[in-house]
Image (cartoon, rainbow, N blue to C red):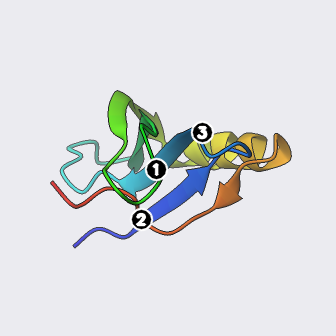
């Protein structure tokens, strides 16, 4: 099972899940998926609506994580079930 890392924005309307791409065929670089979603209704009552998925090299994903933290995003517990 892949470990996921989660962020939520300051007004609790958007979430991002960072997860390693274990199916990557590139022998030289590791990649991560960044799944983004909007929270509809009350957080925790229903899963967010997934809006986008990006695949970035691990170093670029780390840069994105740091950028979001600087913008006020916070770590949060998982809000999507695995699928």
Which is in the foreground here, disc 3 or disc 1? 1
Tally the numbered discs.
3
In the rendered structure, find residue 66 and report the number of the disc placed on it: none
In the rendered structure, find residue 60 and report the number of the disc placed on it: 3
Q: Which comes before the other along the chain, label 2 or label 3? A: 3
- In the displayed structure, would residue 75 be above or below residue 15? below
Q: Residue at label 1?
A: 42
Percent coordinates x, y for residue 35 in the rendering:
39, 40
Q: Is residue 81 left or right of residue 19?
A: left
| Residue nearer the viewer, 23 or 3 | 3
* Alpha-carbon span between mark 2 and mark 3: 22 Å
Residue shown at the point (49%, 62%) measured from the top left: 5
Q: Residue furthest toward the top?
A: 51
* Alpha-carbon span between mark 3 and mark 1: 32 Å
Residue shown at the point (24%, 60%) measured from the top left: 81
| Residue nearer the viewer, 6 or 46 | 46
Which is in the foreground here, disc 2 or disc 3? 2
What kind of element bears circle 3? helix
Residue shown at the point (59%, 54%) measured from the top left: 7
What kind of element bears circle 2? loop
Q: Which comes before the other along the chain, label 1 or label 2? A: 1
Whether pointer 2 and pointer 3 mark residues with C-beta atoms closer than 8 Å, the reply is no
Q: Residue at label 2?
A: 78
Q: Answer with the quarter of the image where residue 34 lies.
A: top left
Percent coordinates x, y for residue 11 in the rendering:
70, 42
Q: Is residue 59 visible?
A: yes
10 Å crowding of disc 3: few (<14), some (14-19), many (20+): few
């Amino acid at each position: 099972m892949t470990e996921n890392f989660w962020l939520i924005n300051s007004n609790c309307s958007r979430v991002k899940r960072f997860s390693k791409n274990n199916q990557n065929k590139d022998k030289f670089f590791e990649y991560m998926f960044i799944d983004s979603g909007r929270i509809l209704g009350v957080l925790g009552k229903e899963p967010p609506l997934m809006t986008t998925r990006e695949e970035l090299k691990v170093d670029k994903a780390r840069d994105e994580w740091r950028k979001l933290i600087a913008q006020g995003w916070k770590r949060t517990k998982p809000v999507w079930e695995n699928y």
